[in-house]
Image: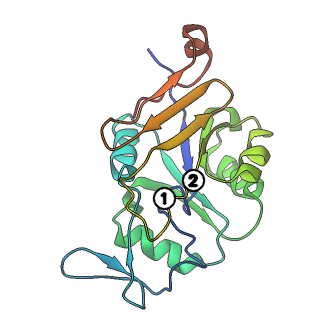
Amino acid sequence: MARLPKLAVFDLDYTLWPFWVDTHVDPPFHKGSDGTVRDRRGQNVRLYPEVPEVLERLRGLGVPIAAASRTGEIDGANQLLELFDLVRYFCHREIYPGSKVTHFERLRHKTGLPFSQMIFFDDEKRNIVDVGQLGTEWCDLHSRPEWNESANPNSGVRDIRKGPHWALRSGPADKPQLRPSSERESARRFQVHL
């Protein structure tokens, strides 16, 4: 049986949604009667389309989920998690400016888990490098130009790399799958098929 992480940690901006909550949108947010989330100016805000399915799959596998974001717009980020009905997935939320190392040290203290049993999803190389040095497994989500706040999230392909031996490609036609580059790697690395 595949070894799963004991904690999956997600960044927020350009990881769960295609914008920076502190610069690209204008809090506070509200949800219309049609279920659409909008900012103060009436601009639609949305998640990446695969996010609810990925979080639900991890929860179904029994993997606890945490958020680690360095945004300065703490209230807005938390409000979006509530309006998108994602707060139910997160057992811990570390949302404040500063190094992701601090976020992970607090998560380790709260959970008692070693860094090596956590997996981290983020789009920023600096965060991946910092957290990777702690011994945490990681998934580097590559933002594409077409994945910005004004584009169709279903266009193009979103690439995700996990460590040096993993690759995930998801597009509108296929379901995301994280696969090791070889069978030998599958025995040593987390296997997360989402």
Q: Quadrant of the N terminus?
A: top left
> Up-down: is 80 above or below 157?
below
Tell me where residue 152 appears, x and y as whole percent: 37, 61
At horizontal 38% and vertical 67% (from top left) the residue drawn is: 46
Outermost residue on the bottom side: it is: 41
- 175 horizontally vs 73: left or right: left
Residue type for callout 2: Ser
SS type, badge 1: loop
Query: Which residue position is annotated with label 2?
Result: 143
Q: Nearer the viewer, residue 50 or 64?
A: 50
Marks 1 and 2, Cα distance to the nearest angstrom? 6 Å
Q: How is the image coloured?
A: rainbow
- 23 horizontally vs 152: left or right: right
Quarter of the figure with residue 170: top left
Quarter of the figure with residue 183: top right
SS type, badge 2: loop
Tell me where residue 47 appears, x and y as whole percent: 40, 62
Tell me where residue 29 appears, x and y as whole percent: 41, 83
At horizontal 55% and vertical 77% (from top left) the residue drawn is: 24
Mark 1 neighbour class, 10 Å CA radius: few under 14, some 14 to 19, many 20 or more: many
Outermost residue on the left side: it is: 34
Q: Nearer the viewer, residue 99 or 145?
A: 145
Residue type for callout 1: Trp
Query: Which residue position is annotated with label 1?
Result: 147
Q: Quadrant of the C terminus?
A: top left
- 30 horizontally vs 4: left or right: left
